Amino acid sequence: MAGGRVLAVIVMTALAAWFTRWAGRTGRGVVAVVAGTAGTAAGAGIASAQLAKAGLDAAAVLAVVVLVSAVILLGWGTAVLVRAMPGWWWLLAVPAAVAVLWFVLFPLTVAVNATNRPPGPPEAATPPLAGLAYRSVAVRAADGVRLSAWYIPPRNGCCCPAPGPPAPR
């Protein structure tokens, strides 16, 4: 999966470099804003997920580096586009920037954060530690794997029966 992500980044970078050779100043600004937006979302989403779950590790440091460079790229691209606008049209840059932040950057950052959380330590809580009555159960899956679990009966008066051995056919 990681190889596919790296390949996608390489392809997108190559396409952006190819496009900017012939795109002119405005095209370079658009590419910088698009790449800066994607990089900011990726950097902020991954950095916040890594720092919250795993602390300051190599992935968090790299994500912060991506975030800083993407914010610089986003700022440069925005400045290029604003300078390229004729007359008073540059005043539309502020509402456009707010719209991009609110409708693109924020949702992308939340999505990246939600899908890139590192695994946390296994939970140490067990039913006896929580003061719950339980019964250990195990079943065999169709592929032969033994699945084990705890059955905790409901405490709200539901009449659901406890799991037991399967009924004979």
Image (spheres, grey):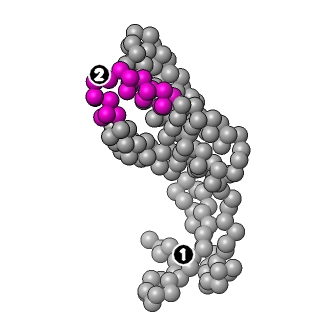
The residue drawn where x is 42% and y is 19% is 28
Q: Which residue, as the protein is rendered here, is positioned at the far front?
A: 87
Residue 107 lies in the magenta stretch: no
Picture coordinates of residue 60 (x, y %)?
65, 43
Q: Are the two marked residues, 1 and 2, in contact with CB atoms closer than 8 angstroms?
A: no
Magenta-drawn stretch, dominant element (helix, strand or loop): helix
Using the numbered discs, state the Cα–Cα distance from disc 1 to disc 2 in whole angstroms: 77 Å
Amino acid bearing label 2: Pro
Horizontal side of 155 relative to 62 (left or right) equals left
**Residue stretch in magenta:** 73-93
The residue drawn where x is 48% and y is 31% is 75
Amino acid bearing label 1: Pro
Residue 91 lies in the magenta stretch: yes
Q: Which residue, as the protein is rendered here, is positioned at the far bottom?
A: 157
The residue drawn where x is 68% and y is 61% is 122
The crowd level at tag 1 (other Cα within 10 Å; few <14, some 14-19, many 20+) is few
Using the rendered view, name the quadrant where residue 86 is placed. Answer: top left
The residue drawn where x is 61% and y is 39% is 63
Reading the image, the residue beneath label 2 is 86
* Callout 2: SS: loop
Picture coordinates of residue 42 (x, y %)?
52, 39
Q: Which residue, as the protein is rendered here, is positioned at the far top?
A: 22
- Numbered tag placed on residue 114 in the rendering: none
Reading the image, the residue beneath label 1 is 165
Q: Nearer the viewer, residue 32 or 146?
A: 32
Q: Can residue 111 be seen in this view?
A: no
Q: Which of marks 1 and 2 is in front?
A: 2
* Callout 1: SS: loop
The crowd level at tag 2 (other Cα within 10 Å; few <14, some 14-19, many 20+) is few
